[in-house]
Image (spheres, helix red, strand yellow):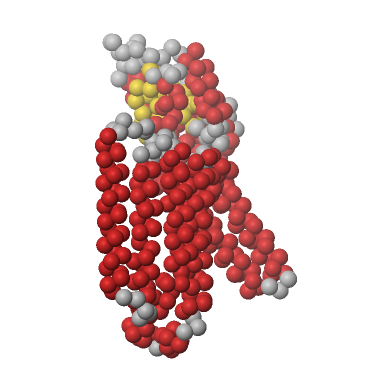
Amino acid sequence: MSAPGRGPLLVLCVDRDNDVGAKAKLETPVIGRELCLQAAMKLAMADPEEADANSIFAAVKLFDEMIEKGYECEVAVIAGLFDRSFEGDTKLREELRKVVSGFKAEGAIMVSDGVEDREVAIILQNVLPILSVKNVVIKHSKSVEESYAVLGRYLRMLVYDPRYSKFSLGLPGILIFLSVVLFYLGQAQEAILFSLGIIGASFIVVGFGLGQRAMALTRLKPSEYIRLFSALASVLVILVGFFTAFADQVAPTPQYLAVLSNPMAIFEHGPYLFGRLLSSAINLVWIGLGLNFCGALLFHWFRRSVKVWRDGVGVVVLGLLYLPIREFSLILTGQGGAITLVLFLLIGLAVTFLVVAVAYQYLRSHRRLPMEA
């Protein structure tokens, strides 16, 4: 007889990784008190440290307690597969359906070792409502067990997931193989340097997301290629300008040699050396900056963006700053004049103010501008 107002309940022990089948050589589902006790004893004899054996004993104990309270109950053990895959979870559902077909329960009390209770409950919920979950923690901390479970998942991901296995297994494998080859050829030092170089390059690529950015380059729009080319060209031209200026106008000077022999001399000769560097590099530097601004202007023009005005003003300001900066570099080398510098700055400021005012008035009179794509 069931207790008043209480429907039949199933005490369900879930062995998701199928230790019952792998170690005790039993077929599941196991239904009934006596058969479940026999399964628990066989599993405990096969592996005395197996937590699932204790879970089955706990399920039988809970079954007895529910019977004493007047519930109509049955106890059963179901199992998945060792790899806890989709096929294993499907097996769990099928075995639960087989149990329910013989015992019409209204709900289940799930008993497990507590590692993946939430996942298992979600898997079985559509077959039979899970009314309660009982965790069985035996002789060790649950948090430690969950930590090992999470660690196991990550280790399996590092081994079997192609997105990560190429770094966790592929790259170390290449390094070990090539290092062995180099050691065999008597190039021990080269093997170490090569391995460190590959590891460092990998850290840079992964850390800065260079792989994803390189893949993104294949999906650029035509206007974005203009922006990319102008930015790269700008950087290269500026670097060439400073490098050639340093090699031709700074490195051969006695002032630079004096700084090399006495670093404190930088305070005496630093302005002169910087002036020579700037006066020699300014043409290429301004060309590089102009490429960047013009590329940005074309980019926003094709996208019909209002930012095209900002880039246009930038081009004008860049042109107006050329003469003041050049005059400033000449002053540092003792060849320019302060009055000329001030005059250039005032003219540049006046023209900049005029250009900005015209652009502002135009934008105010054309409020409805196409939105940026």
Q: Residue at x 68, y 73 (%)?
A: 187
Q: Is residue 294 above or below residue 268?
A: above
Q: Is residue 121 above or below residue 138?
A: above
Q: Quadrant of the N terminus?
A: top left
Res. 184 image quadrant = bottom right
Q: Is residue 80 above or below residue 196?
A: above
Residue 139: x and y in percent read 39, 45
Lateral position of residue 341 relative to residue 284, left or right: left
Front residue (pair 128, 330): 330
Q: Is residue 35 above or below residue 152?
A: above
Front residue (pair 260, 13): 260
Q: Quadrant of the C terminus?
A: top left
Residue 320: x and y in percent read 35, 59
Q: Is residue 83 visible?
A: yes
Q: Residue at x 26, y 52 (%)?
A: 353
Q: Is residue 30 visible?
A: no
Front residue (pair 107, 77): 107
Q: Residue at x 45, y 43 (%)?
A: 299
Residue 206: x and y in percent read 50, 53
Q: Residue at x 56, y 36 (%)?
A: 82
Front residue (pair 340, 260): 340
Residue 339: x and y in percent read 27, 72
